[in-house]
Structures are given as C-alpha cells and as structure tokens.
Amino acid sequence: MGRVTEPQRVKLFVGVLAAAAELLPAVRGRLEAELGPVDLASPLWDFAFTRYYEAEMGPDLKRQFWGFERLVDPGRLPEIKHFTNAVEDEFALEGRRRVNLDPGYLTSAKLVLATTKDFSHRVYLGRGIYGEVTLMYRRRQFRSLPWTYPDYRTPEYHRFFAGLRALYRSQFEACGAKGTRKRVNSCARIPQ
C-alpha cells in the first residue's frame, strides 16, 4: 500500500496576455503583492497564435510569463486561479478584459496549467478549476502533448520554461535538499 505524503512544492508562474504592454507593470505589481516577487520574466512577445481573444481584448496582444520566487503547494492552484480571475476583473474596462492571466506551475517533470474548462485530458482540482499537464520534461527538454496549445509548442516558450525549471532546481540545491521531498518541504528558506 502506498503511503500518503505531502506534495513537493512547485514553481508557480503566470502567463499574461495583455491588450497593451503599458498594463503589464501594474498587473505585475498586483500579482507580486499577493504571490511574492517575480524571480524570472520572459521577453515580451507578440501573440498571434489564435484570434480567440480578439473580440474581447482587441488585436496585437502581448504575451509575457512571470515565474514567482516562492515555491507553493500545488494544491493551491485553484485558489490562485480564482485570485488571477479577480485581478482580470480589476483591470477590465466596461466589462471587457484587458488582461488574461493563466496561472500554472512546473516541477522537474512537467508543466501544469489551471483552467475553468473541463475536457477529456483535464483533471478536476476543486472549486470549479481543472488542471492540465501541458508540457512534460523528458530527455532533457520540454515536450508537447497532443493537446498542448500552439504557443506552448514553440522553442521560445520551451527555452523560457527550461530556464524557470533550472531556477526551480537551484532552489532545491540552495536549500540543501538535493531533490528529496522531505527536506524541501521542511526547509525554512522555501515558504509555503
């Protein structure tokens, strides 16, 4: 029989789509006030992978990812998704979103996104939120899955997430944990 253990803490990130780059500093500040400091930010990219958001947010969207310093319990993902949805509402104008925030986390082995939409490859996490393994890390690189969004398949995203993964792993080493679950979870330098 398997023993129930505490989950290993994970590296939180938020993917941001913005109608205007000028919104990003204020949105980042709002997220950092709740989630702690950003320790890695991606370049600012043009987002042209789908027109799904255009009717609400307009054309010429910008994409950026922010990785957060604090490692978190993966069970907090539904709570964090509710928080980011509330921040989207705070920045909305006349009922239309100007930012779309997609929280997720990564481990040494995978990247998980939170979503409010159920589908065959998604698992219910609670509070109306589902989780999706969007990328897996195998043979020293991130690999797409059949349902991976087109933008998450790009080399640019994979490079950013490889850097975030390296940072995550270095946090373990700085803690003296060498990747062991028990010591990482008890290390005082890694807040919940």
Image (cartoon, rainbow, N blue to C red):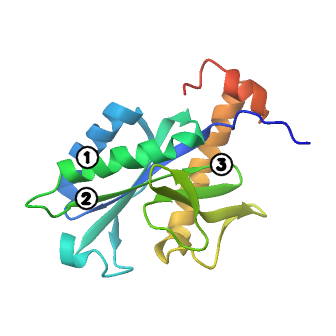
- Asked if residue 58 shows in the view, the reply is no
Give the residue at x 20% y 61%. 97
Q: What residue is drawn where x is 71% and y is 54%?
A: 109
Q: Are marks 1 and 2 in contact (CB under 8 Å)?
A: yes
Q: Is residue 186 visible?
A: yes
* Residue 40 on image: x %, y %: 46, 44
Residue situated in front as seen by the camera: 32 or 120: 120
Answer above or below: position of 55 versus 172: below
Looking at marks 3 and 2 on the same chain, the residue that comes earlier in the sequence is marked by 2
- Answer above or below: position of 172 versus 64: above
Name the amino acid, label 3.
Thr
Residue 120: name its quadrant.
bottom right
In-image side of 117 versus 54 (left or right):
right
Residue at disc 3, secondary structure: loop
Res 27 label: 1
The residue type indicated by label 2 comes to Val
- Residue 52 horizontal/vertical position (percent): 31, 79
**In what element is the residue under mark 2?**
strand
Residue at 70 percent of width and 28 percent of height: 184
Within 10 Å of the Cα at label 2, are there few (<14), some (14-19), or many (20+) other Cα atoms? many
Q: In the displayed structure, would residue 66 be above or below residue 93?
A: above
Residue under pointer 2: 99
| Residues at marks 1 and 3, CA–CA distance in whole angstroms | 25 Å
